[in-house]
Structures are given as C-alpha cells and as structure tokens.
Image (cartoon, rainbow, N blue to C red):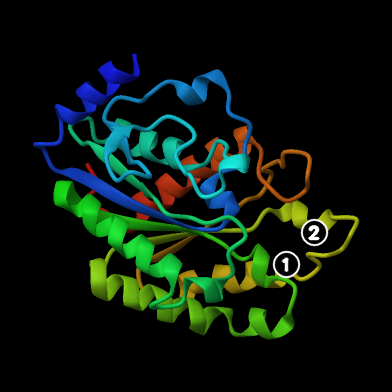
Amino acid sequence: MRYFLLISALAVFGQEMELFLLIGQSNMAGRGVIEDQDRVPFPRVFTLTKEETWAPAVEPIHFDRPERLGTGLGRSFARVLAEAAPSTKIGLIPAAMGGSSLDEWKVGGKLYTDAVRRARVAMKNGRLRGILWHQGEADSMKLELIRSYQPRWLTVMAALRAELGDVPIVVGELGQFLYTREKNDYAMARMVNEQLAMLAVNGSRVAFVSSFDLGHKGDVLHFDSAGLREFGRRYAYAFMGLDGGWK
C-alpha cells in the first residue's frame, strides 16, 4: 500500500505544488494521539519527508522527536485549502522542533538553517505560499523573553522572507488551557499570547489564530487530536484571509 501511495505521489510532481513551511515547537510538530483517520491520505496533499522526498501526508508528518510523534495541525490546514482549490496540490514542509525557544530559531542557527534548506528543496517542485508558526511556551517563563518576543520574532521572519519570498505568515495562540496549570509554571502564557496577537498588528501580512475552546491531551500543555484538527482549519481560513488569490 505504501509503495502504491509513493508511486501515486511521484506521478504529480511534474505539476507545481503550493508549499507551506511549518515551524515552531511541539504544538506545531503535533503531539495528538494518532487515530485511524490520521493515516488516511487526502487527495492532492503531500509532505516532504525526513529524507527530503515527497509522500502522501499521513501522520506523523513531523519527525523531530521520534518517541513523541503525533497528530498535528498541518493535514487539516492543507485539506481545507485543497478543497477550496480543487485543481491545486499542497506540499507541507515540516520543520518544527519540540521544546524549541524563539532564540533557537535565530537567523543562522541550526533550526533556521534546516528550515530554509528544506524549504529550498521543496521549492524545486513548487512555490512557497505561506509560513505557519506556533511557538512560545518555551519563552513564557521569563519576563525579559516575553517583552522582547516581538522584535526577535520580526527579525527571524524578515530573514525568512528575504530568503524564501514575501509570503503570508499565520501565527497560532498558545493553548488557553495553560492558564489553568496547577504547577503555575506557565503563569505568563497569557502575556505571550498578547505578544503573539500583536504580531498581526505590527507585522505585514501576518494573521493571528485563536486557540479558544481547544482541548489538551491530558497534560495541560499539548493540544489533543481534535483540537489540532480544528486549529489547522482555523489556520487555513486565516491564511485565505491574507491571500485573496487562493483558488
């Protein structure tokens, strides 16, 4: 079956794909429990594998921490876009890293460099249309990191756009359930979310996606599978709001 899917995927790569770079930390990589529906490929939705080959986008898409892989938001994001544009083929470029801080995404660092390299590999088969970002939990424990979040993030995104193209960027809110953690170790998550929301105000062609009413997987840290699927849909509608030419 997997051989058939790979052959089917290869058959479409003579046609240009619409590409999306997925970066950030674990909630972008996805830690939801993988269910049967997550292993069923969607028509015209592909992912760049760890080996930098194309395959149908079935979970897990990311490969950052093999012992923790799960369902993410990328597939449901791509499905909405594919259904909205029936002649379009979507290519996801997973490059998130669980536990990563914003400083670990600094220009020239390993995560930044790997993401750019993977994007350029993918762009041999299409054009980059957008960047999806979800990160901030790792920066929510120190006030100085929160206060400097916006300028640091804007620097990283300006560099990515300079290298890969001036594409829309969609930013997701941290899980609002973080506010209820008994340990109180993410007590300033609300302040991070305020910073993330302001990125859509101070950044060009940036959208902010609410995590309101999305559940966690029991750890009060990672979105559950249903929440991630809904989050992906919200990302998709936010992207289409930025890109009026999507069809």
Rendered image quadrant of residue 185: bottom right
Q: Which residue is mark 2?
A: 179
- Mark 1 secondary-structure assignment: helix
In the rendered image, the quadrant that contains the N terminus is top left
Residue 128 tag number: none
Q: Which residue reaches farthest left?
A: 14
Rendered image quadrant of residue 163: bottom left
Asked if 219 appears above or below 36 in the picture, the reply is: below
Q: Give the residue drawn at x 17%, y 32%.
A: 87
Q: Which is more toward the observer, 3 or 197?
A: 3
Rendered image quadrant of residue 223: top right
Give how far across and how far down residue 176 sits, in percent. Answer: 72, 54
Amino acid type at circle 1 is Arg
- C-alpha distance separating marks 2 and 1: 7 Å
Q: Give the residue drawn at x 23%, y 28%.
A: 9
Asked if 198 appears above or below 7 in the picture, the reply is: below
In the rendered image, the quadrant that contains the C terminus is top left
Give the left or right position of residue 125, taking residue 131 as reference. left
Amino acid type at circle 2 is Tyr
Residue 190 tag number: 1
Q: Which is more toward the observer, 16 or 64?
A: 64
Residue 207 visible to the viewer: yes
Residue 243 visible to the viewer: no
Q: Which is more toward the observer, 11 or 194?
A: 11
Q: Give the residue drawn at x 26%, y 75%.
A: 162
Chain-order first, disc 2 or disc 1: 2
Q: Which is more toward the observer, 200 or 216?
A: 216
